[in-house]
Image (spheres, rainbow, N blue to C red):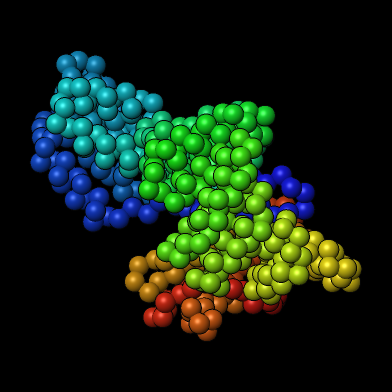
Amino acid sequence: MKNSRAGVRVLATTLAFAAVILVATALRAQEQEAEEKCVLVSRPALESAVEKITKAAELEDPVEARSLYEEALEELQSEIEGDDDPTALWLAAEAHIGLGDFEAADELLDRFVSVDPTCEERAGNSRFNGWADAYNEAIQAYQAGDQEAALAAFVNANVIHDDSRAFNNAGLLYQNLDDVESAVDQFRLAVAADNPTDQARDASLNLAEALRSLGREEEARAALQAFAEAHPDDVLAEMNSAVAQVISGDDAAAQETFTKILARDDLTLDQWNQVGVGLYEADAFSDAVEAFRKARELNPYDWDAMNNMATAALEAEKYELAAEVSGQMVEWFPYDFDAYTLLASAKSQTDDAAGALKSIQERGALSFSLENVQLRERGENGYVVEGTVMGRGEENGAAVTIWIELVDPQGQVAATEQLQLVIPAAGESELFQAELTSDAPIAGFRFQKASTG
């Protein structure tokens, strides 16, 4: 969610870019069911293409895989130009998906289903798998700092399968690139796809924000209200409705909804974070602080809730609270560049000029920063901490060792691991990833100060 307030960090939301993880067993089950309904008949003329496509899908070398897909398509060309053979159409679509040519694949899959309607589910599986590959390609580009490549991959993913996640992320990237009109188009598509619903809901908020930035207040209100009416049992959609009331100037009605939601005791950590973001976007900063406080009651080590609370507290003029929470962020995440900015802003408002200057100096002394850091689970008892390291000084090429700590719900260190980094040149970034294991449940992570050598 984009925030134009000067000197204030962008609120973290559950829209954070996260790669799609395909569950192999579930995917195989879908394919097996699809096969039972959709019978494809292999012929000698197709065997070579089948072999090449199968081998290409297993290769790690993209150049070699591309060559095999292209060879398979050449062999299939005469088969798909004549009578519509469903097997040939599907194989050609798979080859085009492997090449990332989703427009051609989309056309072939439409023909495939038209010839044999029992194959609709198989075609849907092919579409989703192609979409997932492009989506993950976009994630990798984004984490590497290449927003334009990430945007191109998200847009390409949308060609073959409608999914709110890719549409929404494309909209956010268009905003980052100052193309708000295109962002509006993507957010509308995300809401229309409504898959998954939580991303569609967040997209409705993003759509309203983008429309408001273009001066189209009534369209923004209508978009929020429409989503809320379509999801009457969704507390976060109700939140959207309250934001729509704010846009309409009915602050009293909106505050009634805010008060009702804040009185609830059955929301999850993610829901409280989303409620807080909605309140923040409605300029109800004190209420947003309360929502993020409730999120932190559920997990005081959640990074999003911590960052959001400090940001909202600064806007609510709760400067002591903003300084306290952002100070904790700097302590736990000493290579988070923006945390120092947030702390300096809070300190300056508490008449602690020395503290503000110290924070600015510490930020300026950073030779690198860790960006877009995420913690995610991997299998049983496995965790991954990943993000990008960005060079910010003249120490490019220097080796750095950072200790990562996983903490349990009581704040005790449950696992540690060394992260070995090489500092990139100033302004450049590289991906990093560390794997950890813990038998104890994990509530969050933090970093220790690095050593160089």
What is the tally of numbered marks visible in this picture? 0
Residue positioned 17% across, 32% down in the render: 119
Q: In this view, does 37 lie above or below 358?
A: above
Residue at left 18%, top 19%?
84
- Res 130 quadrant in image: top left
Residue positioned 74% across, 47% down in the render: 5
Tell whether 37 sits left or right of 364: left
> Which residue occupies the foreground of this view, 326 or 21?
326
Q: Which residue is drawn at 19% across and 45% down?
A: 31
Q: Residue 220 or 330: which is nearer the viewer?
A: 220
Residue 125 falls left or right of residue 117: right
Measured as percent of width and height from the top left, residue 360 is found at 83, 64
Q: In which quarter of the image is the C terminus?
A: bottom right
Q: In the rendered image, is residue 430 in sight?
A: no
Res. 411 visible in picture: yes
Residue 388, x across and y down, in percent: 60, 58
Of 131 and 278, nearer the camera is 278
Give above or below for 124 relative to 137. above
Q: Residue furthest bottom?
A: 412
- Looking at the image, which residue sits at the far top? 82
Return the x and y of residue 432 as percentages of the image width and height.
Answer: 56, 62
Instruction: Indicate the position of residue 208 as horizontal and vertical percent values.
Output: 57, 36
State which quadrant residue 180 falls in: top right
- 159 in relation to 333, above or below: above
